[in-house]
Image: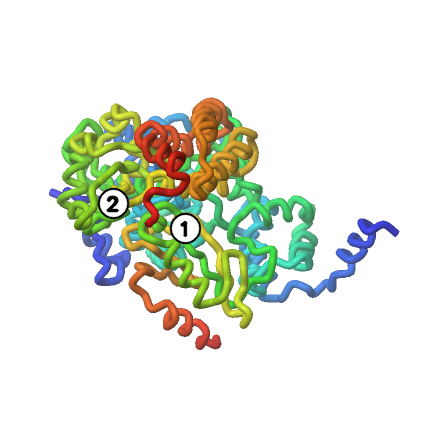
């Protein structure tokens, strides 16, 4: 048996209840907002990611099957966009702006401190699984550069922040 | 007389105005005029007469753009209105301010625009990272539905409008309107071939208008206070006010609403507070990362589309990025090339292959390995990736700071070569 057919079997072997009721409810809501299922595909990936942190192969297959979309096409979409994570990420994703205004205001130097604080470079997840550090294009708060997001929160004027204290607030937040 | 129609309600020391307070301040007057019988064609005429130009970067006349939408009985019934709220132009921070400061102004403008083209569905294509904007806009949308300003048969006009919030999964190319439409349709956000233009065949093949947040926020004022008022706001040739920003090493960076035609020097010195102590202005990008550099000698020009174009650049988003004399211009341009290279959608060859090559050459300069041959290759790429040679405007946008930077800061490139290091690093 070829590897390829092996993968096909694996895909069809997904449990039919892979997607949670909550995920399905959200996906069905999105379906009412767009006249075409294909548009729901990208939204469904975001929904699954919100629940599970990232989009695994299994999640991708489950969404494709649920919506009746070609897997390859959905994978093409998933890998195109910056905010769909196809690898596991930490509990808190740090989107670190490295665009021009932040660069002028010293984001590279602050980023070194961030890396030192967390022991990770761009694209890596800290050993405790708390943080993943990812560069992001301009976050649109350039008069308060350098800036970054931790999870949904924007943090400004990073050169004046106590980074250790800032990150520990997220570490201690057990929600 | 209102002189700051875009920001008059914005006060970040409190919550944004709710619907009732916004309305009390003179909001939703356009909608009430529509309820009293203002026709879609009247709205279009007023916007045309106002002289409003798109504030997203291209500066295309808004009324003219709308006028390409097929109207009347023979036209497709379903039309779409889309807000480009995917603010990601490097150094641009104006649409966030509007959405988080006065969300009803955007919704007000969206109703006016959707009515003008008779679109019953509108999408807000919002930058995914703008989590505060999303929360604030969703709350305002709920209020507008509750008040009957959205939904079916709005104020007994027979006009239906649903506004749907779409948060982007993130790519700069989504700012290009046809790429944005592909993203909304759940596809990879590659730009589309034009023609057909979205006004005729856009979202799901239906007539679609895509306008920038700030553009739309101009509409309520135009309908409420009229053309003469709107045209009297300016100090220059173009009409209305605009948000102008300053980032980089000014004393007081920020974003302000000023009349078009305000001198650049006034923006920098009065609002931005001038350069920080010990720093001189070496150059600036006038409207985000994809505009040509301008020099201190241009400071007495006005913030006006034609004036800036006359200096070889573009007003674009109106958010100035300052280059000071202690910051390396080669490093700054290199940073922009890394951005453009990463954000290329990969569809056409000059952009997909050219930008990473250019980016790599800048890294070599940074490492002290730059050569004169590299400089020649950079020059060639300004042409290879220039306007007309690529599928969309992304790579030509990258050549704007690249080409002008090579021209204006030649000596800095030369020093990197002769000193075999970055002369700005100590």
Judging depth in this view, the residue of B158 and B194 nearest the camera is: B194
Q: Quadrant of the N terminus of chain B?
A: top left
Element marked by disc 1: loop
Q: Disc 2 or disc 1, which is closer to the eye?
A: 1
The reply to whether residue A95 is in sight is yes
> Residue drawn at (43%, 67%), measured in percent from left and top?
A117
Per the image, label 2 sits on a secondary structure element best described as: strand
Q: Nearer the viewer, residue B416 or A81?
A: B416
Q: Image height check: is B138 above or below B296?
A: below
Disc on res. A158? none
Q: Nearer the viewer, residue B93 or B364?
A: B364
Q: CA distance from mark 2 to mark 1?
A: 17 Å
Residue A73 in the figure: left or right of residue B29: right
Q: Which residue sits furthest front?
A: B419
**Residue B344 image position (x, y, % from top left):** 51, 38
Q: Where is B169 relative to A92, above or below?
A: above
Q: Is residue B228 visible?
A: no
Which residue shows up at 56% across the image and 36% down it? B346
Q: Depth check: give the residue in front, B141 or B237.
A: B237
- Horizontal side of B224 relative to A23 (left or right) equals left
- At a point 45% along the width and 23% down the height, the residue shown is B383
Residue at image mark 2: B246
Residue B348 at x, y percent in the picture: 55, 30
Query: Going by the picture, which residue comes out furthest to the left?
Result: B1
């Amino acid at each position: 048996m070829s590897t390829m057919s092996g993968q096909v079997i694996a895909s069809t072997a997904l449990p039919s209840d892979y997607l949670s009721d909550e995920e399905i409810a959200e996906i069905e809501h999105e379906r009412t907002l767009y006249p075409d299922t294909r548009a729901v595909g990208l939204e469904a990936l975001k929904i699954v990611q919100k629940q599970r942190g990232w989009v695994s192969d299994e999640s991708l297959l489950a969404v494709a099957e649920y919506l009746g979309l070609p897997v390859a096409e959905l994978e093409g979409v998933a890998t195109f966009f910056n905010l769909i994570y196809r690898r596991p990420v930490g509990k808190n994703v740090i989107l670190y702006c490295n665009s021009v205004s932040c660069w002028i205001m010293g984001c590279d130097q602050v980023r070194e401190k961030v890396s030192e604080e967390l022991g990770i470079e761009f694209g890596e997840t800290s050993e405790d699984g708390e943080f993943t550090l990812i560069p992001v294009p301009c976050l649109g708060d350039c008069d308060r550069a350098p800036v970054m997001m931790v999870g949904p929160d924007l943090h400004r004027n990073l050169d004046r922040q106590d980074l250790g204290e800032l990150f520990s607030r997220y570490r201690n937040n057990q929600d | 007389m209102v002189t700051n129609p875009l920001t008059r309600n914005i006060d970040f020391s409190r919550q944004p105005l709710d619907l009732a307070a916004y309305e009390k301040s003179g909001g939703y007057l356009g909608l009430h005029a529509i309820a009293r019988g203002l026709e879609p064609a009247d709205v279009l005429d007023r916007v045309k007469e106002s002289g409003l130009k798109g504030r997203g970067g291209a500066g295309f006349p808004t009324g003219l753009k709308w006028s390409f939408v097929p109207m009347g009985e023979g036209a497709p019934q379903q039309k779409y209105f889309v807000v480009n709220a995917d603010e990601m132009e490097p150094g641009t921070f104006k649409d966030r301010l509007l959405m988080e400061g006065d969300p009803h102004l955007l919704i007000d403008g969206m109703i006016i625009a959707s009515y003008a083209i008779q679109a019953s569905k509108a999408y807000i294509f919002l930058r995914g990272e703008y989590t505060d904007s999303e929360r604030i806009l969703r709350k305002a949308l709920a209020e507008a539905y509750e008040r009957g300003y959205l939904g079916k048969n709005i104020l007994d006009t027979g006009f239906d409008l649903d506004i749907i919030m779409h948060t982007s999964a993130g790519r700069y190319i989504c700012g290009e309107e046809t790429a944005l439409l592909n993203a909304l349709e759940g596809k990879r956000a590659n730009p589309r071939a034009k023609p057909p233009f979205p006004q005729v065949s856009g979202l799901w093949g239906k007539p679609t208008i895509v306008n920038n947040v700030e553009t739309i926020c101009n509409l309520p004022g135009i309908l409420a206070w009229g053309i003469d008022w709107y045209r009297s706001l300016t100090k220059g040739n173009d009409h209305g006010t605009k948000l102008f920003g300053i980032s980089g090493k000014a004393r007081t960076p920020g974003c302000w609403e000023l009349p078009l035609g305000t001198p650049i020097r006034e923006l920098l010195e009065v609002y931005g507070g001038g350069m920080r102590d010990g720093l001189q202005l070496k150059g600036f990008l006038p409207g985000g990362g994809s505009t040509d550099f301008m020099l201190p000698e241009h400071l007495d020009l006005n913030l006006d589309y034609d004036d800036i174009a006359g200096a070889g650049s573009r007003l674009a988003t109106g958010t100035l990025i300052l280059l000071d004399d202690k910051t390396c211009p080669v490093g700054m341009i290199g940073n922009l090339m890394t951005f453009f290279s990463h954000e290329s959608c990969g569809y056409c060859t000059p952009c997909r292959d050219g930008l990473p090559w250019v980016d790599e050459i800048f890294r070599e300069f940074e490492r002290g390995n730059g050569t004169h041959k590299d400089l020649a290759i950079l020059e060639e790429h300004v042409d290879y990736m220039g306007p007309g040679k690529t599928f969309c405007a992304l790579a030509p946008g990258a050549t704007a700071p690249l080409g002008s930077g090579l021209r204006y800061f030649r000596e800095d490139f030369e020093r990197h070569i002769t000193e075999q290091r970055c002369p700005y690093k100590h």
